[in-house]
Amino acid sequence: MTLVLAVGLGLLIGLALGALGGGGSILTVPALVYLLGEPPHAAATASLIIVGVTALSGTLTHARAGTVQWKQGFTFGVLGILGSYAGSRLSAAADPQLLLFGFAVLMLLAAAAMLRRFGRDGADAPGHSEDDADGQGTGTRRARPGNTMVTGPRLQAGRVGRVGLTASAVGLLTGFFGVGGGFVVVPALVLVLGFEMRVAVGTSLLVVAVNAATALAARLGSVEVDWAVVLPFTVAAIAGAGGGGRLAGRARPQTLARAFAYLLVVLAGYVAARSLPHLL
């Protein structure tokens, strides 16, 4: 039964991660804790393995479609290394129930971010973004009235500062909770760097893989990993991510993201209800 659950959950999470570039990994820790019986700290470490390997596989799938910006992705990931390490050390000292309650809050924030990102009809549809006015999916932002991204060195410095701050925050989330942080990375790549949606999804998977590897390096040796659960979960998630990557080019992201956001809200309520009594 454990094997069947691990495979089924892995497929679901991989599908979401591959299709949306983020959000799917946030289900991993609750699934490992409440459905597969893993302790919270061990679940966070196992999640980093599952999420990191799956994100790397998804990156390769998107790379074949030409939707990964390697230089920007690696830069974003490297900027988050310090945050990943710090988050891992903080997580090791945190109360397990506090970790889970924080996870519930994080899921609500992720749901809100996804609903906001896909809130307008037509926005973020495959092959189009409001900042890609020619509709060709080039991943570049065209200058237009009111667009001040290209007005001078002060603004460029501001962009660098925002990217660095966002990357550090994503790294901290990855290290502390064992999540990929793609739900933060994707809008950051679209809004700050002007990426077209499909390119942001593909590149975010590269960022997730880099952050997960850093956070995992800080944890290994301090927490035991249940490989009998992690390995089938990871293999299934990789298969799901491959399907999700293909789905991203065909399906409407709005529909997928909204359904997933509502699922996160329900899950957040469940996790909060289970963990909060232990903190009072």
Image: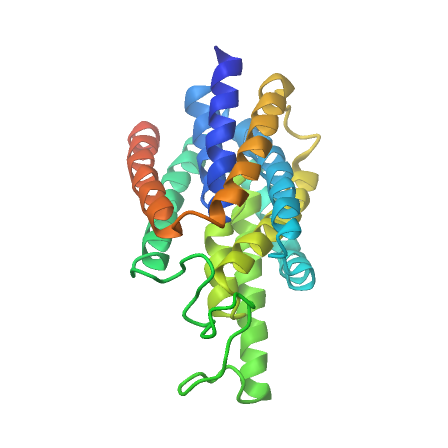
Q: Exactly how many numbered labels are in the figure?
A: 0
Query: Closest to the observer: 153 or 219?
Result: 153
Q: Position of residue 94 (x, y in %)?
A: 50, 37
Which residue is found at the position 47% from the left and 23% from the top?
Answer: 8
Q: Is residue 226 left or right of residue 25?
A: right
Which residue is found at the position 55% from the left and 51% from the top?
Answer: 172
Q: Is residue 126 left or right of residue 61?
A: left
Which residue is found at the position 45% from the left and 48% from the top?
Answer: 250
Residue 119 falls in which quadrant of the image? bottom left
Residue 122 falls in which quadrant of the image? bottom left
Q: Is residue 271 left or right of residue 54?
A: left
Q: Position of residue 217 (x, y in %)?
A: 70, 40
Residue 268 higher or lower than 147, as above or below: above
Q: Position of residue 10 (x, y in %)?
A: 52, 28
Residue 120 falls in which quadrant of the image? bottom left
Residue 279 higher or lower than 124, as above or below: above
- Whether residue 212 can be seen here: no
